Image (cartoon, rainbow, N blue to C red):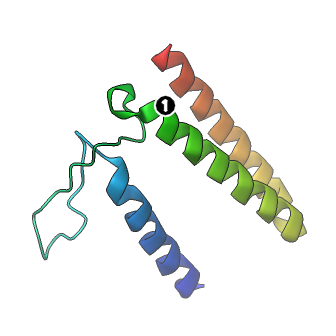
Amino acid sequence: MLLILFSSMLLHIFGDLPLHHDDAHRHFFPLLDWRFLSPVSYWDPAHHGQWASLVEFIAVLAAALIMYRWRPLLRPWVSAIFALYLLYWGYVYLVWM
């Protein structure tokens, strides 16, 4: 279980690194105070946020479908979490429009 937890944390770090422009994190803190200012932002339309968010949405949808199909015991959780994600994405879309 811990392997899954820490693997997901590493996946998040490496997925997060190229998707922050103005709000970049210090991913290597406390070793470095450096921030990578990416030309792409996952949310900011001024930095291709619409496209990055769309790719994120497709990835989440694909992961949810895979988990829904392969893990029947998790179906209620996957459905509930994906419904919340859809609500969030709808809010983001309304804010951008």
Q: Nearer the viewer, residue 59 or 95?
A: 59
Amino acid on which the number 1 mark rests in the picture: Gln
Crowd class of label 1 (few under 14; some 14 to 19; many from 20; radius 10 Å): some
**Up/down of 10 relative to 92, above or below:** below
Q: Quadrant of residue 91?
A: top right
**Up/down of 31 relative to 54, above or below:** below
Residue furthest out toward the top: 97
Q: Quadrant of residue 44?
A: top left
Place of residue 14 in the rendered image (x, y in percent of width and height, measured from the top left): 39, 66
Residue furthest out toward the left: 33
Q: Is residue 18 left or right of residue 1?
A: left
**Up/down of 27 relative to 46, above or below:** below
Where disc 1 sits, the SS reads helix
Place of residue 37 in the rendered image (x, y in percent of width and height, measured from the top left): 21, 49
Q: Quadrant of the N terminus?
A: bottom right
Please tell me which residue is depicted at 47% across the width and 79% down the height of the picture.
6
Q: Nearer the viewer, residue 36 or 84?
A: 36
Place of residue 57 in the rendered image (x, y in percent of width and height, measured from the top left): 62, 43
Please tell me which residue is depicted at 63% across the width and 41% down the height of the picture.
85
Q: Quadrant of residue 27?
A: bottom left
Q: Is residue 53 left or right of residue 34?
A: right
Q: Nearer the viewer, residue 80 or 17?
A: 17
- Counting every numbered tag in the picture gives 1
Write down the residue under mark 1.
50
Q: Is residue 73 left or right of residue 93?
A: right
Please tell me which residue is depicted at 75% across the width and 47% down the height of the picture.
80
Q: Nearer the viewer, residue 71 or 60?
A: 60
**Up/down of 19 relative to 1, above or below:** above
Place of residue 94 in the rendered image (x, y in percent of width and height, measured from the top left): 54, 17
